[in-house]
Image (cartoon, helix red, strand yellow):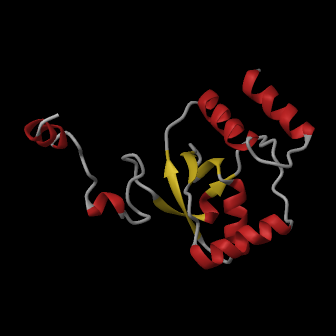
Amino acid sequence: MNLSEKKSSAKQIHLKSFEELFQTESEAVQGEPILEVSLEELYPFPNHPFHVCEDEEMEELAESIRAYGVLSPILVRERAEGGYEMIAGHRRRYASKLAGKTTIPAIIRKYSEEEAIILMVDSNLQRENLFPSEKAKAYRMKWC
């Protein structure tokens, strides 16, 4: 490869700008805005099969949120009755309450009931320490 070929291939490389590398919490994730939503506006997913336990892991999560805030936004959809239905992030919501927070970063998306169920189940099945009954109820929700 000669020098002129190296220069032309270098033009094809796109480096991210400073702004793209260091977006703030309120800026977009994959082009979607992250909004601060009041914890009081959040409602659990109907028939949510996974339990949120107040255990040592929950206290560790709450302590992390006290120190650093919520690092990963929750996923919600709007409810016809007002407020937001949680799809993913029930544990982060509970830990935020324990940490004394009043808001949480959220991504708001439009999902059908079927899409919301699939995302809610799939986002929780990777967790450790799930009860077999939780998994069974989740799979039944997803495929029935």
Location of residue 99 in the rendering, given as x and y in whole percent from the top left corner: 69, 76
**34 over 116 or under it: above or below:** below
Quarter of the figure that contains the N terminus? top left
Q: Quadrant of residue 112?
A: top right
Q: Residue at x 76, y 47 (%)?
A: 127
Residue found at the very far left of the displayed protein: 4
**25 over 76 or under it: above or below:** below
Say whether residue 49 is left or right of residue 86. right
Location of residue 4 in the rendering, given as x and y in whole percent from the top left corner: 7, 38
User: Can see residue 92?
Assistant: yes
Q: Residue at x 73, y 42 (%)?
A: 126
**27 over 113 or under it: above or below:** below
Location of residue 86 in the rendering, given as x and y in whole percent from the top left corner: 64, 49
**54 over 121 or under it: above or below:** below
Say whether residue 36 is left or right of residue 3. right
Q: Residue at x 62, y 35 (%)?
A: 116
Q: Quadrant of residue 39?
A: bottom right
Q: Residue at x 86, y 40 (%)?
A: 134
> In this orientation, which residue lies closer to the viewer: 128 or 81?
128
> In this orientation, which residue lies closer to the viewer: 113 or 88?
88
Quarter of the figure that contains the C terminus? top right
Location of residue 54 in the rendering, given as x and y in whole percent from the top left corner: 85, 65
